[in-house]
Amino acid sequence: STKAVILVGGPSRGTRFRPLSMELPKPLFPVAGHPIIEHCLVAVAKVTEIKEVFIVGYYDETVFREFINYASNAFPQLSIKYLREYQALGTAGGLYHFRDVILKGRPERFFVLNADVCCSFPLLEMLKLFEDKEAEAVMLGTRVANEAASNFGCIVSDAHTKRVLHYVEKPESHISNLINCGVYLFSTECIFPAIRSAIKRRTERPRLLSYPSSENLESSFYQGEDDEDEEKENQVIRLEQDVLSDIADSKEFFVLETKDFWRQIKTAGSAVPANALYLMKAFQTGSKELATPSANIIPPVFIHPSAHVDPTAKLGPNVSIGPRAHIGAGVRIKESIVLEDAEIKHDACVLYTIVGWHSKIGCWARVEGTPTPITSHTTSIIKNGVKVQSITILGKECGVGDEVRVQNCVCLPYKELKRDVANEVIM
Ligand code: GDD
Ligand code: GTP
C-alpha cells in the first residue's frame, strides 16, 4: 500500500508570509476558496490506494484540528492525522521521528508533499514512473528560467532514462534549470536507511564544517545556551541537503518532469499567482464551484456563497471572494483575494491585491499592485531603484479611506490609510 505525508513546517517558518501568517498558519490560508493544504489533499485523495495521510509539522496540536475534522468528512476514504514534532526536526528529521507510525501496516512506499507549493500534483504519473522504472525514489521536477534556478534544488538528469544523476540544493552557481518541486515518492526500504546514514554521518563528525569552534575541546565543558542551540541545530536533518544527493549517487532515483503549472507559496504576495493558477485549473476542469461567467464576471472567479456581490460590480479574472465579504456597486476587482468579512464600498477598484479579514475599502478608492509575469517566480519588483512587493497586501482590519490610492504597499493589521501611499510597508 501507499501513504502520504504533507510537510507543513511550524510557526517559526512562513515569516515571509507576514502579515497574513500573523492571523493564520500559512497552510490554512485560503487560495481559490480553499486552504492551501486542501489542494494537496485533493490530489492525494485521487490516488485510490492511499488510505492514510499524515500532516507533519511543529505547530501546536490544536492548529489543524478543525481543518482535519472538516477534511475527514470531505475525504471519508482517508484517515488524516496530525503528527507534531516537539521542535523543528527538518524535512527528513520529521519523517524519521515518525517512522514507526508511517511504517505501520508495512506500506511499500509513501508520497511526501511540501505544503507550500502550488501545482497540479501529478501523483498518478509519479506512481506510474515509479513502477515502470522499479524505482526507489521519484521526485517531481519542473523547468524554470536559468536566473531563477539557484533558488531551488537543482537536478541533473539523464534526459532519456529520467534518472537523477546529481542533486544540489540551492547551488551557488548554475548547474541545471530542472528544479525540485517539493513532491516525492519514496520506497520505505530506501528512504529510512538513507536518513539513518545521514544522521550517523552527522554524529560521527559533528559540527566540523559549520562550527569550527567546537573543535576546541575546552568549549565542551560549558553547557551554555549556545550549546543548546547547537544541539537543536544538530538534530535538524534535511532531505534536500543531507539525503537526496546520496540517493542520487547510490539508488534508483528518477525525476518526473511536469509541464503543468508550478509555483512556490513563500511570500504573502505569492498567494495571488497561486490563487490564479488553482482558479484556472478549476475553470478548465469545469468545477461547479466557480461563479457563472457573465458580462460582469470574467472567469475564473470564486465567490463564497455567503458573500454579497452587487450585480453591477465587475469581477475577474482570477478573483476569490471570501465568506461574508461585501462588494458594493460599480466596484472593479481583478487578480485579487478578498478575505472573510471584508467590505469594499461602491466604485472602488482593487487590482493585484489581498484584502485582509474585516478590512474596509472606501468608495472610489484604488488599491493596486503590479502584475508580474507568471514565469518569474518572484513577487518583488524594482520601482525607482528600490525593491518593493508587487502585490498590495492589507492585513487584518485595515481601512482605506474614500478616494485614497494605495499602490504596491504591505500594510500591517489595524492600520487606517487616509492619504495616498505608494511603495511602502506601513507599520
Ligand atoms: N515537519 C516539518 N519540519 N516540515 C518542515 C520543516 C521541519 O522542520 N522544515 C521545513 N518544513 C516544510 C515547509 O513547511 C515546506 O512545506 C517544506 O518543508 C520545505 O520547506 P523549506 O525547508 O523551507 O525548503 P524550501 O521551500 O526553501 O525548498 C524546498 O522546496 C523547493 C520547492 O518549493 C526544497 O525541497 C527545494 O529543493 C525545492 O526546490
Ligand atoms: P476590463 O476589460 O474591463 O478588465 O478593462 P481593462 O482591460 O482596461 O483592465 P485594466 O486592468 O486596465 O483596468 C481594470 C478595469 O478597472 C478597467 O476596466 C476600469 O474600468 C476599471 N477601473 C480602473 N480604475 C478604476 C477605479 O478607480 N474605479 C473603478 N470603479 N473602476 C476602475
Image (spheres, rainbow, N blue to C red):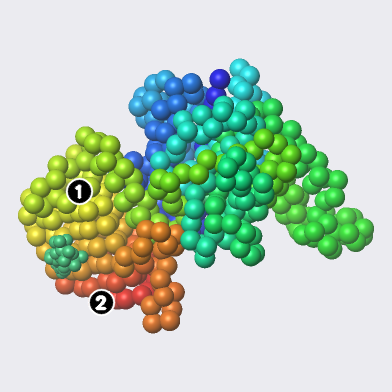
Q: Which quarter of the figure is the N terminus placed in?
A: top right
Which residue is at a point 10% across and 52% down the rendered structure image?
296
Percent from the top left, x then y, of residue 138? 58, 37
Name the image quarter holding residue 290. top left
* Labels 2 and 1: the sequence-earlier one: 1
Q: Is residue 104 above or below residue 19?
A: above
Percent from the top left, x then y, of residue 351? 25, 63
Which residue is at a point 52% across and 40% down the rendered structure image?
256
Q: Count the marks: how many?
A: 2
> Around disc 1, counting alpha carbons within 10 Å, would you say few (fewer than 14), some (14 to 19), or many (20 or more)?
some
As shown in the figure, which amino acid type bears the numbered disc 1?
Pro
Secondary structure, mark 1, is loop
Q: Is residue 263 above or below residue 160?
A: below
- Whether residue 250 is visible: yes
Q: Nearer the viewer, residue 285 or 412?
A: 285
Percent from the top left, x then y, of residue 100? 66, 25
Which residue is at a point 7% across and 54% down the rendered structure image?
312
Q: Is residue 73 above or below residue 333?
A: above
As shown in the figure, which amino acid type bears the numbered disc 2?
Asp
Q: Nearer the viewer, residue 69 or 414?
A: 69
> Of tags 2 and 1, which is closer to the observer?
1
Q: Which residue is mark 1?
A: 299
Name the image quarter holding residue 224. bottom right
Q: Is residue 64 left or right of residue 1?
A: left
Q: Which residue is mark 2?
A: 420
Q: Label 2 to label 1, Cα distance in Å?
A: 31 Å
> Around disc 2, counting alpha carbons within 10 Å, would you say few (fewer than 14), some (14 to 19), or many (20 or more)?
some
